[in-house]
Image (tube, rainbow, N blue to C red):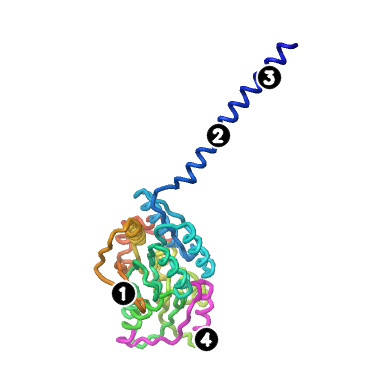
């Protein structure tokens, strides 16, 4: 009996020593982690929302490129809320990230927090949407005036002289909407087409486009064309046109080359969409963000005036997609697969 008790005491003592060693090792490792945080470049990526189909592609391409360069990215989604996006940028400031890349929900609303981030030594990239009067370190986007020009050129080429058109624009808080409108009106002003109804879709809410078509039809039912700020809005405009037996009779244009828009193009119910190679944009933005985070000087071919400052500007070219070139531009570039684009088309 005494031997058993002695063995039990020894066993407990040994186990205690082992347990203490294990805990000590864990604590040391934890302390090391605290004292030696990751030395990888830290990039914060702030999205407006993921309601628009293309943003998923942007996120994936950006994330893959950043990680391939040995940096880390933290993605935040504001779900269309300017206040939420401000809070997320504040969070990145507290985390002392090296670079913040922002797809602004409302450029005016985030201006002050962007200035705060810059004062903290954080580099700022305005991604696809310019943040005015903020002196960001880089603005990278597509030529949005050209997007509007391409839309207008399609309407002008396919609508008889004197035709009446609706313009269903995106969110007024998105600077790109103004740029697209500028390019669009530049072409329309030289034509005989008449804009008889115009509407904004605050926060890019697609449902507003549905209501806008009905509001426009109350102005006139003799509509020949509709410019939609993007293909998500075009989805709802198409629904309203279908309910009024006008789908395919009204020349409709959009942008982003969403799958649904590409399907309508081959079906004949949407005339064109503007394709923007977003993977190329996201990859370039990621590479520039890493350069900024490493303290490298950026060399861009041009600048853009943000209202107060000349900001380095990287501009990519958009492409008009129609039934004639959709295979070449969309399918051959693996943007959407052939079987999905032609899903509803009976081919001989």
Q: Quadrant of the N terminus?
A: top right
Q: Neighbour class for label 3 at 10 Å: few (<14), some, many (≥20)?
A: few
Q: Neighbour class for label 4 at 10 Å: few (<14), some, many (≥20)?
A: few
On the image, numbered disc 1 is attached to which residue? 310
Please name whichever residue, 314 or 223, is drawn nearer the observer in this view of the structure. 314
On the image, numbered disc 3 is attached to which residue? 9
212 drawn magenta: yes
- Give the mark nearest the N terminus, 4 or 1: 4
- Give the mark nearest the N terminus, 1 or 3: 3
Mark 3 and mark 4 residues within 8 Å of each other at the beta carbon: no
Place residue 254 in its image quadrant.
bottom left
Please name whichever residue, 104 or 57, is drawn nearer the observer in this view of the structure. 104
Give the magenta range. 188-216
Q: Position of residue 77 (x, y in %)?
A: 50, 61
Q: Residue at x 32, y 74 (%)?
A: 150
Q: CA distance from mark 2 to mark 1?
A: 56 Å
On the image, numbered disc 4 is attached to which residue? 218
Q: CA distance from mark 1 to mark 3?
A: 77 Å
288 vs 247: above or below: above
Q: Nearer the viewer, mark 4 or mark 1?
A: 1
Q: Position of residue 149 (x, y in %)?
A: 32, 77
Please name whichever residue, 342 or 82, is drawn nearer the observer in this view of the structure. 82
Q: CA distance from mark 3 to mark 4?
A: 92 Å
Q: CA distance from mark 4 to mark 1?
A: 44 Å
Q: Residue at x 41, y 75 (%)?
A: 175
Please name whichever residue, 103 or 100, is drawn nearer the observer in this view of the structure. 100
On the image, numbered disc 2 is attached to which residue? 24
Q: CA distance from mark 2 to mark 3?
A: 23 Å
Q: CA distance from mark 2 to mark 4?
A: 76 Å
- Give the mark nearest the N terminus, 2 or 3: 3
């Amino acid at each position: 009996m005494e031997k058993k008790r002695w063995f039990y005491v020894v066993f407990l003592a040994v186990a205690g020593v082992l347990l203490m060693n294990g805990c000590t090792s864990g604590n040391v490792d934890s302390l090391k982690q605290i004292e030696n945080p990751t030395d990888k470049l830290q990039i914060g990526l702030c999205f407006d929302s993921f309601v628009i189909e293309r943003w998923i592609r942007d996120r994936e391409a950006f994330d893959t490129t950043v990680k391939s360069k040995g940096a880390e990215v933290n993605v935040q989604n504001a779900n269309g809320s300017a206040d939420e996006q401000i809070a997320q940028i504040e969070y990145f400031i507290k985390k002392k990230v090296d670079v913040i890349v922002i797809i602004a929900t409302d450029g005016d609303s985030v201006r002050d927090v962007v200035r705060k981030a810059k004062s903290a030594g954080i580099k700022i990239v305005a991604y696809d949407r310019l943040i005015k009067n903020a002196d960001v370190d880089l603005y990278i986007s597509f030529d949005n005036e050209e997007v509007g020009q391409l839309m207008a050129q399609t309407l002008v080429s396919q609508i008889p002289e004197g035709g009446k058109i609706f313009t269903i624009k995106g969110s007024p808080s998105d600077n790109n909407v103004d740029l697209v409108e500028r390019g669009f009106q530049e072409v329309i002003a030289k034509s005989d087409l008449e804009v008889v109804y115009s509407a904004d879709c605050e926060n890019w809410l697609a449902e507003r486009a549905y209501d806008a078509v009905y509001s426009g039809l109350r102005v006139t039912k003799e509509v020949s064309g509709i410019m939609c700020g993007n293909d998500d809005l075009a989805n709802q405009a198409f629904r309203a046109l279908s309910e009024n037996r006008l789908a395919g009779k009204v020349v409709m244009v959009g942008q982003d080359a969403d799958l649904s828009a590409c399907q309508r193009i081959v079906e004949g119910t949407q005339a064109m969409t503007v394709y923007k190679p977003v993977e190329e944009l996201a990859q370039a933005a990621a590479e520039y963000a890493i350069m900024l985070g490493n303290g490298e000087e950026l060399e861009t071919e041009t600048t853009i005036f943000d209202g107060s400052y000349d900001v380095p500007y990287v501009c990519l070219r958009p492409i008009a997609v129609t039934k004639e070139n959709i295979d070449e531009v969309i399918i051959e570039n693996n943007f959407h697969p052939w079987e999905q684009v032609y899903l509803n088309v009976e081919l001989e």
